[in-house]
Amino acid sequence: MTGSAGQDIAQLAAEVLPYVSAAVGAYGMRVLDQIGDDTVAAVSDATVGLGRRLLDRLLTRRRGETDGSAAEISRAVRDLAASPTDSDAQAALRLRIRAALAADPELAAEVRELLPAPALVVVTAHGARSVAAQSIVGSVVVTGDGSLPG
């Protein structure tokens, strides 16, 4: 998958990873045993619970597929559970998730629906010559009559 669609799937996988990592961090290796357990889902906090539901969707939807992505995701989850702070294990899981989402557009749509909507950023400037920005990096902002940077 190339171009915009590939970037969209990569972004979706990146958005899924923190939630799945939270579930793996909370439950460790047992997270795979708890897929489909509604009792565990009911007592999980919001982030961990969402991570568990995302992982549940990724694994149950891909089981039975001939591409082996459910087994690869499970293996990557086990690796991350063994070393939760290992950035290579996190990247490996993200890549497995991305591959599963790219292979199944319907799954990608289902996962996208489970994620919370992005926070709306509102930036407001008040007053004459005010500057409004969410982030200003590496730039100089100058306002006023006859003002010169520097």
Image (tube, grey):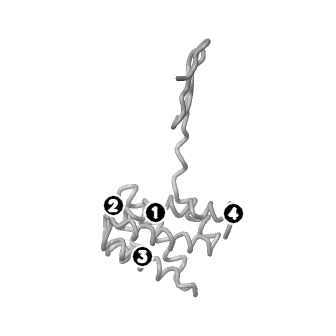
Label for residue 3? Answer: 4
Give the left or right position of residue 27, taking residue 145 as reference. left
| Tag 2 secondary structure | helix
Vertical placement of residue 62 versus 148, above or below: below
| Tag 1 secondary structure | helix
Label 4 and label 3: CA atoms lie apart by: 26 Å
**First-in-chain label (4 vs 1):** 4
Mark 1 and mark 4 in contact (Cβ < 8 Å)?
no
Label for residue 107? Answer: none
What's under tag 4, amino acid-wise?
Answer: Gly
Vertical placement of residue 119 versus 141, above or below: below
User: Which quadrant would residue 104 be assigned to in this image?
Assistant: bottom right
**First-in-chain label (2 vs 3):** 2
Label 2 and label 4: CA atoms lie apart by: 40 Å
Which residue is denoted by mark 1 in the rendering?
A: 17
Which residue is denoted by mark 3 in the rendering?
A: 76
Which residue is denoted by mark 2 in the rendering?
A: 43
Residue in the image at 66% along x and 70% along y: 1
Mark 3 and mark 2 in contact (Cβ < 8 Å)?
no
Residue 53 % position (x, y): 45, 66
| Tag 3 secondary structure | helix
User: Which quadrant would residue 43 be assigned to in this image?
Assistant: bottom left
Residue 97 % position (x, y): 51, 70
Can you tell which of label 2 and label 4 is closer to the viewer? 4
Would residue 135 be visible to someone looking at this image? no
Can you tell which of label 4 and label 1 is closer to the viewer? 4
Q: Nearer the viewer, residue 61 or 98?
A: 98
Q: Nearer the viewer, residue 128 or 34?
A: 128
**What crowding class fits label 3: few (fewer than 14 Cα within 10 Å), some (14-19), or many (20 or more)?**
many
